[in-house]
Image (cartoon, coloured by chain):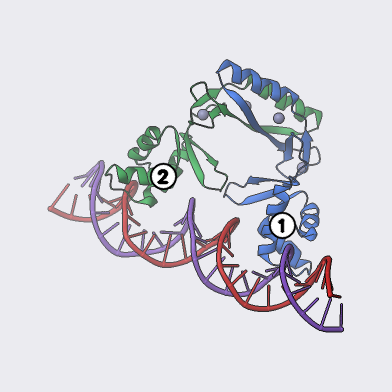
Chain colours: A green, B blue, C red, D purple
Amino acid sequence: MSRSNPRVLSTLERAGGFASAQEIHKLMQREGEKIGLTTVYRSLQSLLGDKIVDVLRRDDGEAIYRLCGDSHHHHLVCKSCGKTVEIEGGAIEKWAKAVALEHGFRDIGHSAELFGTCADC
Amino acid sequence: MSRSNPRVLSTLERAGGFASAQEIHKLMQREGEKIGLTTVYRSLQSLLGDKIVDVLRRDDGEAIYRLCGDSHHHHLVCKSCGKTVEIEGGAIEKWAKAVALEHGFRDIGHSAELFGTCADC
DNA sequence: ATGAAAATGACAACCATTTTCATTTCTGTT
DNA sequence: AACAGAAATGAAAATGGTTGTCATTTTCAT
Ligand SMILES: [Zn+2]
Ligand SMILES: [Zn+2]
Ligand SMILES: [Zn+2]
Ligand SMILES: [Zn+2]
């Protein structure tokens, strides 16, 4: 696996925390950076492998990448401006374990996302 | 919007509750049904609009459709055999509201999925 | 300077999904 | 039955994000 081009990460930061590969590429070109779309994809793959970013999907299926530390947590995202708060999910962790036990499941994992409108919007 | 071809829904049921459009199409052909891929896609869109099915994404981005009632609930899915239990998420609803207030967000929505290994696997 | 290894990017290939459009099937009316 | 209009169908083409290929360029240690 190739190493991530640092300008990709810095552009993702500047983009407000999340963006698609194509958006990052357009942004970099608009700012005069010479970089190929392929390299942007490769860098994002690498950041993904290093748990520096997270990936989720738009409704149309396009992958969007998000800055995200590697410890387990959840997100509260503003649907309007994209502002994101990282959340500790203590209550959910307990709920997940309880529900799993109740139904005889083991090796439980979970995903949870909150979205709404932030105070500034 | 065209109406759903009932054989698509019945195939989705037979497939164990969730499958991609392409998988449903292959299944139907293997069983001798004559149906076009386009019609499968259209039927799934219609079922989606009627809140009969749910859609989520595989890691590779392919959309998979899942039988799912229209009342708000969550899912506990077996990663091995696909067995799915529908869960009431009272605890999550409260957690979501509490976290939202704490951070000044309003109009909160959420998504949550549990996955693990069921007792039979 | 030299060569090996890594990174890069133009281009092609891939594949799920959508669009197009001509044909077929359904439905009600005379 | 005959007809017309509407709805459904599906083959083929178009779309578009993503990945693969491979020749070239850059990096880096010796
Ligand atoms: Zn995060
Ligand atoms: Zn958690
Ligand atoms: Zn199972
Ligand atoms: Zn809920």
> Depth check: A54 or C17 in front?
C17
* Above-or-below relation of D9 to A101: below
* Res. B76 image quadrant: top right
Q: Residue at point 71% right, 57% down?
A: B43
Q: Amino acid at mark 1?
A: Ser
Q: Secondary structure at mark 1?
A: helix
Answer yes or no: do the residues labelled 1 and 2 have beta carbons within 8 Å?
no
Task: Give percent across and percent down for residue B89.
Answer: 74, 28
Picture disc at residue B43: 1
Work out which residue is located at the far top of the displayed protein and give it. B102
Side (left or right) of D17 relative to A13: right
Q: Is residue A99 in view?
A: yes
Indicate the chain on which mark 1 is placed: B
Task: Give percent across and percent down for residue D30.
Answer: 22, 44
Q: Is residue A75 in view?
A: no
Side (left or right) of B8 relative to A78: right
